[in-house]
């Protein structure tokens, strides 16, 4: 079973990746959970990235 998270871009870099790589799809698969951060894979498998669960500068996340 894959756990999912929903992300919202906050920075310009994140907005570019969200539109261009992720096709504006906010749902992601959680690949790794390191406690204070998670490694995500976009549903289309084109973007892989770390998100800090508290105060990430690029992404807001909802688990």
Image (spheres, rainbow, N blue to C red):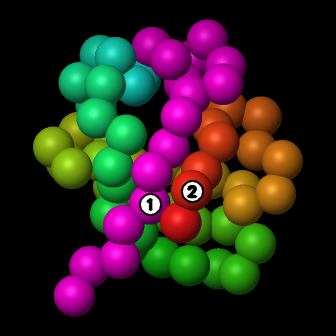
Is residue 55 shown left or right of residue 46?
right
Determine crowd level at label 2: few under 14, some 14-19, many 20+ residues with C-alpha closer than 10 A.
Answer: few
The answer to whether 8 is drawn above or below residue 16 in the figure is below
Q: Which mark is residue 58?
A: none
Residue 50 magenta-highlighted: no
Q: Is residue 47 visible?
A: yes
> Front-most of 21 and 59?
59
Q: CA distance from mark 1 to mark 2?
A: 6 Å
- Is residue 21 something that shows in the picture? no
Q: Position of residue 18 (x, y in %)?
A: 40, 25
Where residue 49 appears, as percent x and y from the top left, is: 49, 49
Which residue is located at x 68 percent, y 66 percent?
37
Using the image as rendered, state which of residue 59 and residue 31 is in the foreground.
59
- Residue 54 placement (x, y as % from top left): 81, 57
The residue labelled by disc 2 is 62
Crowd class of label 1 (few under 14; some 14 to 19; many from 20; radius 10 Å)? some
Which residues lie in the magenta part?
1-16
Q: Residue at x 50, y 17 (%)?
A: 15
Mark 1 vs 2: CB contact within 8 A: yes
**Which element carries disc 1, helix, strand or loop?**
strand
Q: Is residue 51 left or right of residue 31?
A: right
Looking at the image, which is closer to me, 32 or 55? 55
Question: Considering only vertical position in the picture, is 63 above or below 6?
Answer: below
| Image position of 45 (left or right of 61) | left
Q: Which mark is residue 5?
A: 1
Give the residue displayed 44% in from the left and 60% down from the top. 5
């Amino acid at each position: 079973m894959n756990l999912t998270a929903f992300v919202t871009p906050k920075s310009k870099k994140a907005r570019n990746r969200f539109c261009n790589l992720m096709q504006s799809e906010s749902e992601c698969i959680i690949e790794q959970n390191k406690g204070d951060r998670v490694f995500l894979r976009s549903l289309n498998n084109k973007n892989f990235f770390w998100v800090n669960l508290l105060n990430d500068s690029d992404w807001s996340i909802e688990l």
